[in-house]
Amino acid sequence: MMKISPKRYTQAFGVAVVLLAMLRCTHPELAFAPAEKSVSQADSAVVADSLAASDSLRTELAAQSAAISRKEVASVPAAAPKPLGRPSRFFAADGTPVKNRIYSVPHFGNTFPDQNDVQLVAAARYGVKAVVDRADAERRKSELVYVGSNPFYHIDSRMRSSIPYLVPRAAILLQDIGRSFFDSLQTKQIPLHKVIVTSVLRSKADVEKLRRRNSNATENSCHLYGTTFDICYNRYHTVEDPDGPRRRQVRNDSLKWVLSEVLRDMREKKRCLVKYEVKQGCFHITVN
């Protein structure tokens, strides 16, 4: 049997230690025994299962919490939307049109008190020189505007003592009154009607003939200057499709009340002067 010297033993032991250290560094899993490995792997599996169960539990709790929140929100009544500024007279909060009431004016005579002398001042300011007769009116057409057929008003077919002309300022006023009357009827959900114009420009010859059968006719009439027109309040021209269904009937009084609201607004805006004519059944209007 060969004997190993202490020096050789020490060298061999050192080499073995170095080799084992290198092997452990390159393959650390060899440091564990098989039983220890299985235990470690089992622990890892348990930890993974626990984490998976925790994630599943968190997901389920989140779903339950969201369902409860939706249920609570659904059980709370929806708050009404806050109006922006003052409430509209024409539309409800949901955008549907509001049927406005008819208020009329408190008293026709007091609301429209402008007598002939007051209206003459405006007629002399905004009108043309008084028209003598029909021939003179023909020569003055450059100063006047024709006021025949119009989408917003109707010229009375029975008009005999007037010529269908006005100064431009008065013609614009007449059209604006007819348009505003249309708008007011629509907001009150009333079938459309046109106002009927019964008198416009008159010559001095027309006034003289009229005075023979109408004692109330004024010799120095505002109608001489092309600034004045009459709108009757007891007759209206219905707007309807001749081939369509008949429109529902509307009382003339209801239309008169709507027209009075329009004329009051125009007068308050200083656009016209208005006299309520009881016997003639009309509003006597001069542009301002």
Image (tube, helix red, strand yellow):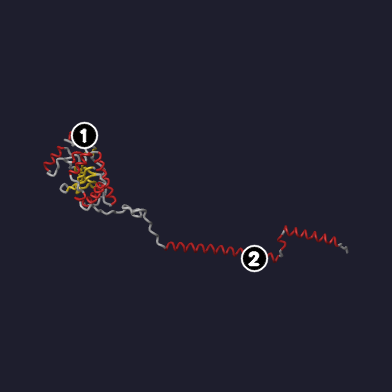
Q: Quadrant of residue 42?
A: bottom right
Q: Is residue 255 above or below residue 128?
A: below
Q: Nearer the viewer, residue 86 or 18?
A: 86
Task: Give the amino acid at mark 2.
Answer: Asp
Q: Quadrant of the N terminus?
A: bottom right
Task: Give the amino acid at mark 1.
Answer: Arg
Q: Nearer the viewer, residue 36 or 287?
A: 287
Classify residue 273 as left or right of residue 48. left
Residue 243 seen in this snapshot: no
Around disc 2, counting alpha carbons within 10 Å, would you say few (fewer than 14), some (14 to 19), or many (20 or more)? Answer: few
**Secondary structure of the residue carrying numbered label 2:** helix
Which residue, given by chain and number where applicable, does mark 1 sit on? 140
Around disc 1, counting alpha carbons within 10 Å, would you say few (fewer than 14), some (14 to 19), or many (20 or more)? Answer: few
**Disc 1 versus disc 2: distance between alpha carbons?**
114 Å
Give the x, y percent position of residue 241.
26, 47
**Secondary structure of the residue carrying numbered label 1:** loop
Residue 106 seen in this snapshot: yes
Give the x, y percent position of residue 278.
16, 49
Q: Is residue 61 above or below residue 280?
A: below
Give the x, y percent position of residue 72.
44, 63
Which residue, given by chain and number where applicable, does mark 2 sit on? 43
Identify the residue shown where x is 49% and y is 63%. 65
